[in-house]
Amino acid sequence: MNILESIVIALDAVRAHALRSFLTLVSIAIGIFAIIGSGTAISSLNATVTKQLEAMGDAAYQIKRTPSIQMGNTWRKYRNRKALTYQQAKEFKKLLNIADAVSIGNTTFGITVKNGNLSTNPDVSLHGVDDAYFITNNISLSDGRQFLPEDIAAARPLAVIGNDAAVKLFPRGNPIGQSITIKNQRFTVIGILTSKGSMLGQSQDNEVLIPISNLMKYYVDEWEQSVAITVKSPGKDALEASMDESIGLMRALRNVKPWEDNNFEIETGESLSTQFATFTSYLNFFGLGSGLVALVAAGVGIMNIMLVSVKERTREIGIRKAIGARKSWILMQFLVEAITLCQLGGAFGIGLGLGGGLLLSSLLNAEAAAPVGWIIFSVAACTVLGVAFGLYPAWRAARLDPIEALRYE
Amino acid sequence: MAAEQPIIHIEHIAKVYTMGGEKLYALRDVSLDISPNEYVAIMGPSGSGKSTLMNILGCLDTPSSGIYQFNGLDVRSMSDNELAEIRNKEIGFVFQTFNLLARASSVKNVELPLVYSGVKRAERRERAEQVMHSVGLGDRMEHKPNELSGGQRQRVAIARALITNPAIILADEPTGNLDSKTGKDIMRLFYNLWQSGNTIILVTHEEDIARHARRIIRIRDGCVESDLPNEENEASYSEAI
Ligand SMILES: Nc1ncnc2c1ncn2[C@@H]1O[C@H](COP(=O)(O)OP(=O)(O)OP(=O)(O)O)[C@@H](O)[C@H]1O
Ligand SMILES: [Mg+2]
């Protein structure tokens, strides 16, 4: 028996029932699309975020009240944690020994920045930072100067602005030395950040930095009282010692009893990317899950088509058996037909999924990553699907009695 | 004649259908021997069991009881695959309703038995074309069945039955769906096949058609009523057609 012969017969049968085949093909394509699409988008996202997190440096870490990435219903778990106050952070900064730099920051989002009657959208991130922030976060300026320790201590009304605000508020001139208004407070621009481009479709230059002392004074509500501390350890080797010291110090400052867990979080770039990977694996699981549901639905469609096809072609099967086709040949013919149908749908879905995934990741400005593994998975899944849902109809065809099949009207 | 081993040997064959608890005998008790190069006509009224007998002889159906030996082999103990092989290689079956694959060209239809016996594509095509020529359809290779006349369709079916060089050709009312002129053409084809050494059994209920055969078996109510050589002179017969 010849597989190629079966494929030709199968394609012929697909062509003969073009509409019906097409509909099933579409449902397979949707299933594969869901799997491939989410796979492509997520691996692109992963590649981009991992790269960004690595850029944070492997000797830095952060201390915060709650974790950066939270999954599930963890609000209950963290809501009773005491704020990590600016006061506490300043104390911490003073006492920590094993560190190259310690910066204290806090951010409030959705801020409007004005220059006379020119105004940004109400979507600027306003970072309250200190002088060490430029070291711990590897921030560089394209123009002007950074904050000095005395700027922070005296809460001087100074600002370092991102490229977006600079372009929007100062379309003609140099912003340095000019003043901007944030919620009725005036700040003098002393520096402009180097443009960072965009990530996942969002500009990373839509931000304004002011001294943390000012941010805490004017812009944060009670529930935003907690600050984040970023520590740059003297090197990768000293990271662990530095973190140990930080934990001990923090526990002492926050009165944590020896038998209690930390009531704060300490995160490295590495631990963040692990957390992010867990997060995307949930997304992956979701894409896979919904894709599988679609595929099973498609499988039922395939089985239905094949059962109808077997029924309609009962006489044909009778003829083939009458002139000497073995059971196994009939079985194979209908199985190959089911698999061919699935693979056609799968190929369609792979195209759709790759296209969609790449489109999505280019919209999000993430790096494109073609998941070869997913394609192999799809081909395998379609074969399994074809066999799983084609077997019963094929078996029904194979076991038909030749004389009864020939008599079938 | 009797010294030769018969191709077909059946003894006390019966076929029973149970319908609503009642037993219905399609065949009661049939015994026959068919030897190589015989030309047999099976006759009988409608419902007498002719088709049932042919289907059993053609290994399409199985008897309820009795003995069936094909070329000395016990058919009733054969597996499905062995039966498929006998149908494929040893028997050429011609149906009243042609039973061609509607979507395949006539030459593809003729090739099909060779596909199942694993003959290579090129050889298959060559043999199919040869047989198509021999039944006078050399110019209709690529026609689909619905692009052919009834007589041409039956020729395609005969070509398909002939392509594996079977030991015996079974034809169940091969002219039943054809007008008398076309029927006559088909009968001439069978006559020529017999002349060139083939063994043929055909079912008919027309005396005119049965005259062509050299032996006539009459069946009534699932039993053999008579089994006689055709008295007609062969020479005068061949002149007649
Ligand atoms: N599948 C079946 N189930 C029940 N009864 C059947 C079946 N097949 C045939 N029969 C019965 O068996 C008997 C013989 O049928 P068969 O088809 O052999 O007759 P026939 O001699 O070929 O008749 P005709 O000349 O009309 O073709 C009939 O009475 C028929 O009703
Ligand atoms: Mg009949």
Image (cartoon, coloured by chain):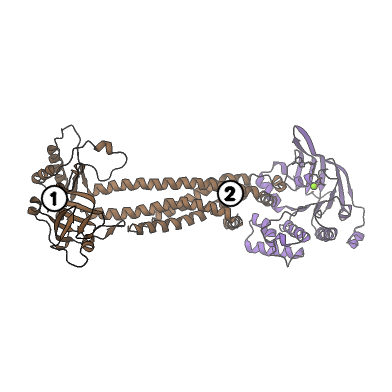
Chain colours: A brown, B purple
- The residue that mark 1 highlights is A214
Label 1 sits on a secondary structure element that is helix
Position of residue B177 in the picture relative to residue A94 (left or right): right
Q: Nearer the viewer, residue A188 or A316?
A: A188
Q: Find residue B17 and report its image quarter.
A: top right
- Residue B54 percent location from the top left of the image: 78, 47
State ligand 1's quadrant: top right
Q: Nearer the viewer, residue B24 or A269?
A: A269
Gap between marks 1 and 2 measured at Cα = 70 Å
Q: Residues within 10 Å of mark 2 (few under 14, many from 20)?
A: many
Along the polypeptide, which appears first: circle 1 or circle 2? 1
- Residue B64 percent location from the top left of the image: 75, 38
Marker disc for residue A305: 2
Please say whether residue A293 is visible from this viewpoint: yes
Q: Nearer the viewer, residue A326 or A251?
A: A251
The chain carrying label 1 is: A
The chain carrying label 2 is: A
What residue type is disc 1 on? Answer: Asn
Q: Nearer the viewer, residue B238 or A223?
A: A223
**Picture residue at 16% right of the left edge, 41% below the top:** A247
